[in-house]
């Protein structure tokens, strides 16, 4: 079972809602959220946590609030749900969470933002650069490609220290045996990509 859920656009919680939602989280998570200096980041983190609890309940796996720990390369895992893989992502206008009991999973959500030519050159291979240049909306096309690469990197758990240009070639994806589902998110003028183990 691989499942995911998103909130886009993310409607800010008021102070009373935040207090109520924080009270449902383990102390470790409350401390981490409270230490965040940016109010929007606190909202995103709480929303992602609530989505994760909803997914656990939907899968009839919910026993207790999930507790996070960080693995190699910064990928989080659930201490008290060791057989369950999960991943989360947030941007200025949305959050996304995925869970799987079959394999690692990676998810990325992005809303429209300015991107530099230097970043496009660093991330994209020649074919992708051509797709961007030929697109009626180059900025959106780049974000589509970016969410796919980010979801794959999160699936792999490697972080972004590797060469990003060859990541999405058909040969590379086939060798990994993964599927990447990508969809537009018109409500936030963005994209969502989910990466999981391909099934035969």
Image: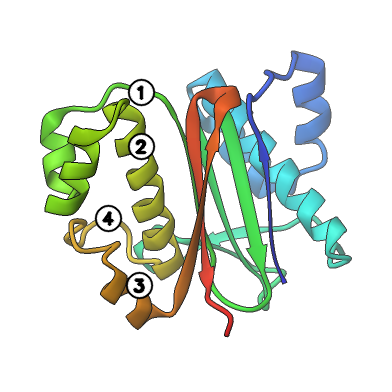
Front position in the image: 164 or 135: 135
Q: Quadrant of residue 78?
A: bottom right
- In this rendering, would 191 be left or right of 157? right
Q: Upstream in the sequence, badge 1 or badge 3?
A: 1
- Other residues around mark 2 within 10 Å, as few (<14) / some (14–19) / many (≥20): many
Residue behind mark 3: 173
SS at circle 3: helix
Residue at point 68% right, 18% down?
12
- Mark 4 and mark 1 in contact? Answer it, CB < 8 Å: no
Q: CA distance from mark 4 to mark 2?
A: 16 Å
Instruction: Farthest residue to the top: give it.
Output: 14
Residue at 60%, 24% in the rendered image = 187
Task: State left or right for residue 117 relative to residue 41.
Answer: left
Q: Is residue 93 visible?
A: no
How far is the residue under mark 3 from the one under mark 2?
Answer: 19 Å
- The residue singled out by tag 4 in the image is 160
Q: CA distance from mark 3 to mark 4?
A: 17 Å
* Cα distance between the residues tagged 1 and 3: 27 Å
| Relative to 119, residue 3 above or below | below
Q: Which residue is mark 2?
A: 143
Residue at which label 1 appears: 113
Secondary structure of the residue carrying numbered label 1:
loop
Q: Is residue 37 above or below residue 50?
A: above
Image location of residue 156, percent across then percent down? 40, 69
Contact (CB < 8 A) between labels 1 and 2?
yes
């Amino acid at each position: 079972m691989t499942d995911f859920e998103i909130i886009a656009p993310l409607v800010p919680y008021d102070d009373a809602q935040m207090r109520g939602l924080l009270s449902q989280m383990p102390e470790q998570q409350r401390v981490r959220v409270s230490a965040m200096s940016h109010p929007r980041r606190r909202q995103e983190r709480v929303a992602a946590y609530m989505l994760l609890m909803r997914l656990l309940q939907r899968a009839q796996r919910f026993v207790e609030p999930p507790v996070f720990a960080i693995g190699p390369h910064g990928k989080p895992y659930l201490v008290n749900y060791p057989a369950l893989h999960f991943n989360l992502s947030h941007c200025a206008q949305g959050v996304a969470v995925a869970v799987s009991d079959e394999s690692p999973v990676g998810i990325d959500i992005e809303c429209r933002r300015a991107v530099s030519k230097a970043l496009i050159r660093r991330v994209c291979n020649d074919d992708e650069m051509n797709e961007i240049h030929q697109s009626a909306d180059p900025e959106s096309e780049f974000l589509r490609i970016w969410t796919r690469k980010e979801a794959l990197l999160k699936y792999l758990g490697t972080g972004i220290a590797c060469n990003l240009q060859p990541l999405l070639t058909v040969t590379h994806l086939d060798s990994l045996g993964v599927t990447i589902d990508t969809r537009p998110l018109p409500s936030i003028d963005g994209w969502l990509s989910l990466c999981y183990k391909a099934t035969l």
